[in-house]
Amino acid sequence: MIKFIVLMIGCTQNLSLSFIYLFVYYIDLLDDPIYELRTQMENIPSAKKAQERVFALLNIKSKLHFGSKLLNSNICCIDLDHVDFGYNENLVLKDCSLHFENGNIYGLIGPSGSGKSTLINLIAHLYEPQSGTIYINNVGLNEYKEKETLKEIEYIGQNEKNVNPYEIVDPYHRYSREKIEKDLGYTLNDELSKGQLQYLYLYKALMSSKSVIILDEIFSYVDMDKIKNAFSKFKEMKKIIIVVTHEKEVMQFCDSTISMEDLKYD
């Protein structure tokens, strides 16, 4: 607006173009830091919320409890018994009771921020309930040694960055690269399509020896025939499969669906 006014005045007062140009130029120099300052001020509330969430998580993690028990078998059942959990005073889960058992595929649905990741992190004992109990094979989760139950939980999400595709699917080098490429039907290189990369994660789940498989949003670019074939194999594996997805076509392959909206609190 200021620039427009200056231009109009310049035209009516017969000011030189060089004078008008210099005036507008110096207005820009002054306006840039003001705009940057305003932008930073607008970001302060969201930055403050992010900071509070980080501090809340640090406080939660510092209160984790562990015992001395070992997990001497596969995980055959997971139970949440009247679990409450939240960040500071904001409850994400309230009086949540769920049962997972081997041989079943569970679909976990809900919008972003509804608590899907929180539920998974509670099962993995990265967080601890503020009330209620989580049981693994009918033993309280905090009775196990630290990281003991994680030996049987395979979390698969698209969070690996700058990792060789072969390392993603087989980090312990249990199988030859040739076998994996033959199973996949394509060469493992750094130029995989989105569909090939996601199928790599799905293949990793099928190859896992762990008894709990958590699949977090890895289906959107995978061919439906491949997904159908993978879920058919999952049903034969007799494991606990937890699927996080927004794909309705994928949900049809689950034995039951857990809506985070149905677990809502207030």
Image: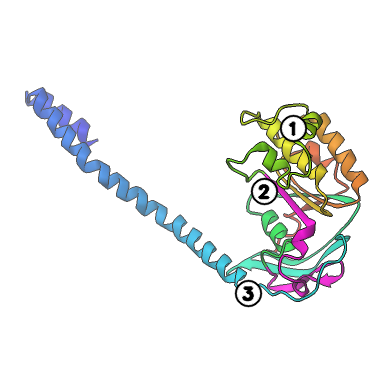
User: On residue 222, which mark appears?
Assistant: 1
Nearest the eye: 246 or 194 = 194
Amino acid, disc 3 = Lys
Of marks 3 and 2, which one's residue comes earlier in the chain? 3
Examine the rendered structure and indicate whether residue 107 appears above or below residue 92: above
Q: Which residue shows up at 67% across the image and 37% down it?
A: 165
Please name the residue that numbered disc 3 is placed on: 63
Q: Residues within 10 Å of mark 1 (few under 14, many from 20)?
A: some
Question: Which residue lies at the image location 89% right of the left edge and 55% below the top edge?
Answer: 102
Near-viewer residue (34 or 200): 200
Q: Which residues are magenta?
A: 128-157
- Residue bearing the label numbered 2: 111
Which of the two discs, 1 and 2, labels the residue nearer the N terminus? 2
Q: How far apart are labels 1 and 3 at the CA level? A: 40 Å
Residue 93 lies in the magenta-colored region = no
Q: Position of residue 139 (x, y in %)?
A: 84, 72
Nearer-the-camera pick, 215 or 144: 144
